[in-house]
Image (cartoon, coloured by chain):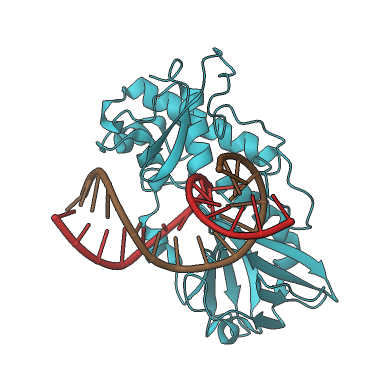
Chain colours: A cyan, B brown, C red
Amino acid sequence: MPELPEVEVTRMGLAPSVEGRRIEDVRIRTPRLRSPLAGLREHLCGRIVERLERRGKYLIWRCRDECACTGFLVTHLGMSGRWRIWPLPAPEPGPHDHVDLVFSDCLVRLTDARRFGDMRWFDDDPGRHPPLNALGPEPLDAALTPGAFARRLRAHRAPVKEVLMAGRVIAGCGNIYACESLFEAGIHPARAASRISEARCERLLAAVRAVLERAIAAGGSTLRDFHGVSGENGYFALEAGVYGREGRPCPRCGAPIARIVQAGRSTYYCPHCQR
DNA sequence: CTGGTCACCTGGAAGC
DNA sequence: TGCTTCCAGGTGACCA
C-alpha cells in the first residue's frame, strides 16, 4: 500500500493519538510478519511513545520507560499494511488484524492482509542498523542538495528507475512515485543513471520532491486502496500521469503510455516525452 | 559490487 | 456462476 507519502500521512494521523501517551497493553495475534513478533509486548508495555518519526517508508516509534530509558519500535507497512485508530472499545479484530497497541482511551491496530509488513524493536538508534542504515537521504530534507543527489545517482550504472526504487540513493520512492517522478522529469526509466546529465539529475530531484509533496498534501490518496488512520476512504485524489495507464494517452503529448518490466516490477512511461 | 530470480502472502480483477 | 491466471504499493536472500 504505502510509499513515502502514505507513510507520512499515516504518521501525521497517528501522532496526536500516540505521542506522549503510555502503551497500556499490546495484543499480538500473529506469530510473525516479516520478523517474529514475539518479545514486542515485553518491550512495549508501559513505555511512553515520545515521538513518532518517519524514515523513508519506515515509522520509528521512539519510546521511553519510567527510567527514561529509550528504545525504538520500527514498523513497515509492506504492500498491504495500514494503521487505524479506534476509540475504546474497539471492534473485534478481523483475520488480518495482527497487532493492537492499546492506550488509555484508544488503540491503534495494524491490519495487513499480505503480511509483508514488519515490526521490530531496537534498544539503540535504529539508524545505525539494518535496514535503516542502508537508506539514502530523505528526499524532502532540504539538506540534500541537487549536486549531492546528482553525484550519488550518477555513481550507478543500473537503469535509473531501479536506482530510484532501491532506496539507497534516495529513500522512500516506490514503484508509483518512481514512475511519476521520471515522467515529470522527462527521463526514460531504462536510462542508465550514470548517463543522466547533472542538469537532468537536478530536474529529477525537483520532480521527486514535487510529486511526493503533492501526494502528501492530497492525503496520500494516490493509492486506490489507501485509507487514513480513521478509516476514511481512499480515492484517487491525484490522477497518475503514467502509472497504471498502459495504452492510454500521455497527458502531455497524447502518445500511448508504455509498460515495461524492470527488476520484476511494472514501469509505466511515455516513450515520446521521456528520453 | 552487479544483476537476475525467487520467496514471502492474500485478494481482487480479468479471462474463459 | 465458477475456475484459473495474472497482478499488486516492498524487501531481502541467494546465486552466478
Image side of residue A234 versus residue A194, left or right: right
Q: Position of residue A24 (x, y in %)?
A: 72, 82
Q: Position of residue A248 (x, y in %)?
A: 58, 23
For the point 40% across and 40% down, the residue is A164
Image side of residue A48 versus residue C10, left or right: right
In the foreground, A58 or B4: B4
For the point 54% across and 76% down, the residue is A70
Does residue A15 sit above or below A8 in this rendering?
below
Does residue C13 sit above or below A78 in this rendering?
below
Tally of marks: 0
Q: Residue furthest top?
A: A253
For the point 80% across and 68% down, the residue is A86
Q: Quadrant of the C terminus of chain A?
A: top left
Image side of residue A128 versus residue A64, left or right: left
Q: Position of residue A240 (x, y in %)?
A: 61, 31
> Quadrant of residue B15 in the image?
top right
In the foreground, A270 or A205: A270
